[in-house]
Amino acid sequence: NKSPFVVANLKVLGEDRARHWGMDMAVIETHAASAATLPDLTPIWRQVYRREAGEARDVDENLYGGFVSNNDRKVLNKLRLKSAAQLTSEMAFFEDAQLGDLLFRYRARNFPGSLSGEESQRWQQWCRHKLDEGLGGRSLAQFQQE
């Protein structure tokens, strides 16, 4: 795993844990000393990830909008094992209403033949609106201007 491990206090890692993960404490301490001399980027990251209060997010773009509850996680795990036909006939009840929209879009993207006529119209209307308005991203016109 080449992902960085960031920790404020190296005592949390310790020699045994470092050895277990194949980490060299001398290298880690050298990197920590080097990182300590770098400027504090906290204000920049706050600005990058700042959201306006009450900012509406499309469910597809709301990755950091909250965590899935344990009950919803159980429902999602069961749904992942279902076929397109089973997803169509299955009524899923979520604590988080956004998950219902995500399930609909999952079906529309991956199993378009499973949509009813009304659902198909709803999906096509959403796609058209996404292309025309951008809905939090770039519209088709903006994309073509680039």
Image (tube, rainbow, N blue to C red):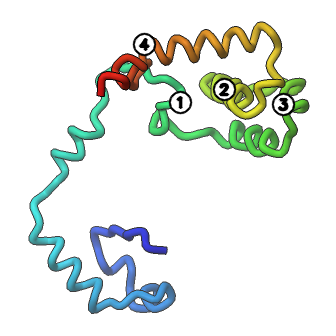
**Which residue position holds label 1?**
60
Cα separation between marks 2 and 3: 12 Å
| Numbered badge on residue 105 | 2
- How many numbered discs, if any? 4
Asked if the residues shown at circle 1 and circle 3 are in contact, with their CB atoms under 8 angstroms apart, the answer is no
Sequence-first disc among 1 and 3: 1
Q: Position of 1 compared to 97: left or right?
A: left
Q: Secondary structure at mark 3?
A: helix
**Which residue position holds label 4?**
133
| Numbered badge on residue 87 | 3
Sequence-first disc among 2 and 1: 1
Asked if the residues shown at circle 1 and circle 4 are in contact, with their CB atoms under 8 angstroms apart, the answer is no
Position of residue 103 relative to residue 119, above or below, is below
Cα separation between marks 1 and 3: 19 Å
Identify the residue shown where x is 20% and y is 85%: 30
Disc 1 residue type (three-letter): Asp
Sequence-first disc among 2 and 4: 2
Sequence-first disc among 4 and 3: 3
Asked if the residues shown at circle 2 and circle 1 are in contact, with their CB atoms under 8 angstroms apart, the answer is yes
